[in-house]
Amino acid sequence: MALPGCVAKSFDRPSAEYGFEQSRKQYTLADFGAMADQFKAGHFHKSLHCISYSEVESEFWRLLQALNEPISVEYGADLHSSSAGSGFPTANRRPRLFDSRDEAAKWDAYLADEWNLNNLPLNEQGFLRFLHQDINGMVIPWCYVGMVFSAFCWHIEDHWSYSINYLHWGEPKTWYGVPAHDAEGLERVMRAEAGELFDASPDLLHHITTIMNPNQLMSAGVSVYRIDQEAGDFVITCPRAYHAGFNQGFNFAEAVNFCPSDWLPVGRQCVDHYASIGRHCVFSHEELVCAAAIAAVQKPACIKESQLPELLFELQIVVDREERELQVLAALSVPSDSSKSDGTNGGKFDSNERGFERFEVLPDDDRQCSVCSTTLYVSAIVCQCLPRRLLCLSHSDQLCPKCTSHLLYRHTVPELRKLVASLSDRTTGLEQWRRESTDLLARMRRARQASGDSKCSTMTTRPTREQLAELCNRARKQLGVPRSCPILAELRSALALADQAASIVQVLLKPPRAESGKSGSGGNNKTAANADKKRVPYASFQAFRSKLAGLACTVDGQSEFESICVKVDAWLARCHKLLVKSESAAGSNPTETDSDAEAVEEAEALLAESAQLPVSLDELPKLREIAVRLNWRREVGSLIRGSSRCSMARIEELNSCQPPASAVGQQLLSKFHALYDRALQITYGVKILLQVTSTDRGSEDFDNTEAILMIEQARRLPIDIDLVDRLALLAESVDDWQVAATPPAGGFNGLAEVERLVQTGRSLGVRLKKLASLESQTELARAWLRQAGDAFLRPADAASAGDTALDIEMALLAAVLPVGADPQKFASSEAEEAQLLYNTATAAELRQIAAYSAADSAVVVERSKRPGMDTLLALLVANRGFQIRLAASRAIHLLSERAMAWRQRVHDTLLSTVELRAALLLVARALHFRLPHKLMWQLRSRLGESADAELAGVSARRPRKSLLFPRAPLEADTDTTGGEFDSVDDIDETGRRRRVDPAAAAARVSGLRLSVETHSQLNSLLAEGRLLEVGMEETDWLRLMLRSATASAAFVAASASTSSASVAAASAAADASSAASPAGGKRARLLDA
């Protein structure tokens, strides 16, 4: 348990040192600097830069000796860096933001640097890191802000440790140092000079209050050294090296202690010295040694191999001293718990002993020896009368005589012996590792010396890479050998070289990446060159081979690498043999190709093998050149003899190759150039033929005969020209098209067929004479169809027909064909289906007559505009020169023939009887229209001598001279109106034609009487005329005759009965006709509707 500190002891301390007192004024760094600079300039009465170092030094020692010239300066000493701040970067003061990444990286580098005084005491070589406490001034740096004449007196560091001082900035600091071997000499001089002070304070020099001129020390034989520490300089003091000094002016410094392994015996001597003068320790030296030993056993890597001997030696001293002093205690019969295990105590044991104690958790003031003030750790003696009074085992002779004392221990002797054994085992392991490593390194050196060639003949005597790695891992992970150990450094260097060599070997063992294109004689030289760049140059390969042969150990894959080396050597031998052979055979006969073939095969085999090697061989370019030349000679000779063929692309490659320079090679080259020129001529001719559609060819047509001739010439060459195959395909297509484009005897069957031919001809991409002719015929046919559509189709029908010629043709057929006929069927048929018009006409006429009835009020649906005969004849004449058989043209032709036949029948009927002739003349005379010239002539022939009298008031038209006239408005006597015949033409007094109402026209005709047979005959003709989709004047004649005729009641009754009989007969005839003709049946049913 922790005991409270002794109050009396706190007062039993030295008072404030003479000559030094705490300043009552607080400064900022800037204020202190201004004060310091002002003081220095005022004291010397000079500018700061004019004051020399020697001048300040002389003044400093003069002032120390001038007792009647008092002067006071201030010194900011022993400032804790944890509170005042360190001049070095620290983790808890790292800025959150930096101006740049470089600045942040620089800060972090200084933060982790070993020369950062915040890191130096706790680095891997220092033993202060094993203390479980932060000691200001030793582990945590102290800062010093000085001014001129501010000084630090003669002293040595606590525990005689090393110290390091860094001057961050400011004016220099002057140091005086005395080596450790003269430390006692300095102390002797000091005692001689101020013995009374030492009698009062034996540790006077540790108070840092005593100063003496170095000249006085040197005159007494003490070695003194001097140095001026500039800004940025480190000053290191060694153990027990006394040092003193002063500041030349305003500056800022920082200092800390550190304890490497060579300090351990010095630190033990220091503790013994402290015990002799009763000085308090800063820490327990035994605790430091034990903590380091435990860490070395538990974590071998934390203690370097070079530090183990000193640590083991110090631990052995601690154990030996503890065991020896326990034996002394046993003689004094002090009850000891530790005697249970070691048997060294023969005294009696007290059952109330305190036993085990964790001294490291107690405050240092509560575990000090009451005699020598040593900080206790391994064991201590406690008295029952004064539990807070502890003694070290060395002062057991000063035990309390009145009571029984007890022993408190942190470690028993057996525990310490076990720790010594463990540390010794590690040391033994280090010795064994050292022996094995030394032996292995010797074997490596002998192997390097024995491997004079590149064959690795001593591979079996070399250590392996795994042995190297095992020694390195054991040194770092198990034994904690430091990296700075020369043996480990050499092992690690050899291992690094082995790993580097192994990685290179593994790269070389990987199969080379396959390149696109061949690398052989017919391959792409550029691609092969790029592939060579990705491989290891042969010189580098040989250099690595030599290094691997001289490597101190073997690596993984080394045997496989040697196999590659053997392959490379064999390849080089074969390649050199082939190169010599090819040079000697350069002038041989070109017809002797057996040797060339063997050489080419060997060259290609070598090139193929080189592609599998990871080495870029220097002979490869020449080998490729030789292979290309040999292959050129063989291939060109084969082409010239006609024993082989090749493509035009290969011919281009052969032309770009460099042929053999011999006379034989020049002969082959001359013949090859002739063959190549002929191939170029044919290629050019083929291109010209394939470009006949370009604008620079004008109106020139594709010549299929010339193309076939060009193809035959090309195929006689031993060269496959790609354009020739294209030309052959084109010529064949053109020939097939021209055969199909030749019109048959009756012309092409329909516009669609011709349009398909035109489309096929255009897709060929060449200019063809027949194609232009077909395009012209197609345009004429389309124009004719548009003209026919304008003549026949109503506006609504034309709009619904669309813009294509096929739609217009179908609409025309639907308008022109008889009712019930199928336009699509008619369009795809020949004349036999057109004959269906005539086979169904009679039944249709009888149905129409029955539909009209006596009232003559039935409505007939008109499918077209009903153009006149002149328009039909003009369309037929315009279609006369076509090479395309149009269904609409055939339908219009049949329609015109039927209309002409009907007209002739009407004329014949009107001339057949006196009654009809009289009716015709009566109507013509009443309406003043002109009769056709032929009809007029026939009337005259029928009337005979009375013709002039009867034809009075009736005129005739002049006959037309030709039907070959352009399309024009119809003449005055031609009816071109569409729709119902609800009006007729009349001639006024001026001779002009005009429209009159049918009823009014019928009123002009008076006294017209027709018999029943005549009425029925005219009505039948009128019905047939109205079925025709042609506007004809004869329909007007017949209609007016029928409307103007009046009959008696008896006559009408008789007419009705006769009419019924006629209708019955017509129906029977129509049924018979329907049975004989399906199309006629459809037409009859439509008329019934």
Image (spheres, rainbow, N blue to C red):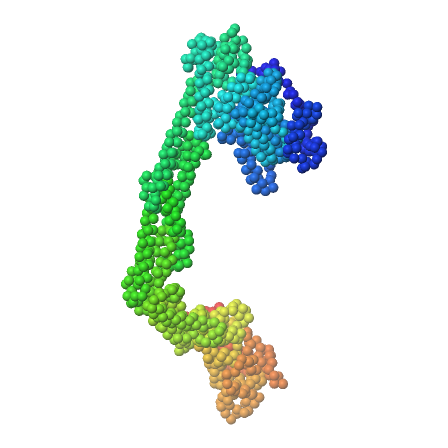
Residue in the picture at 37% in, 40% down: 552
Q: Quadrant of residue 436?
A: top left
Left/right of residue 219 with respect to residue 849 in the rendered view: right
Percent position of residue 287, x then y: 50, 21
Q: Nearer the viewer, residue 438 or 982?
A: 438
Q: Is residue 969 visible?
A: yes
Query: Looking at this rendering, what residue extends furthest in the bottom direction?
Result: 945
The single residue placed furthest to the front in the displayed view is: 219
Q: Closer to the camera, 898 or 181?
A: 181
Please provide percent x and percent y for residue 143.
61, 30
Camera sees residue 1047: no
Residue positioned most to the top = 402
Q: Residue at x 56, y 76 (%)?
A: 977
Q: Residue at the spot x=38%, y=49% of the render?
A: 541
Q: Residue 800 at x, y = what percent?
A: 52, 67
Q: Determine the image quadrant of residue 884.
A: bottom left
Compared across the picture, whether 865 is left or right of 29 comes to left
Query: In the drawing, does residue 229 fall left or right of residue 543?
Result: right
Query: At 53% from the left edge and 81% from the top edge, which residue is drawn?
Result: 966
Is the residue 228 above or below the residue 275 in the image?
Answer: below
Number of marks in the rendered image: 0
Viewer-nearest residue: 607 or 869: 607
Quadrant hosting residue 23: top right
Q: Position of residue 1081 (x, y in %)?
A: 43, 70
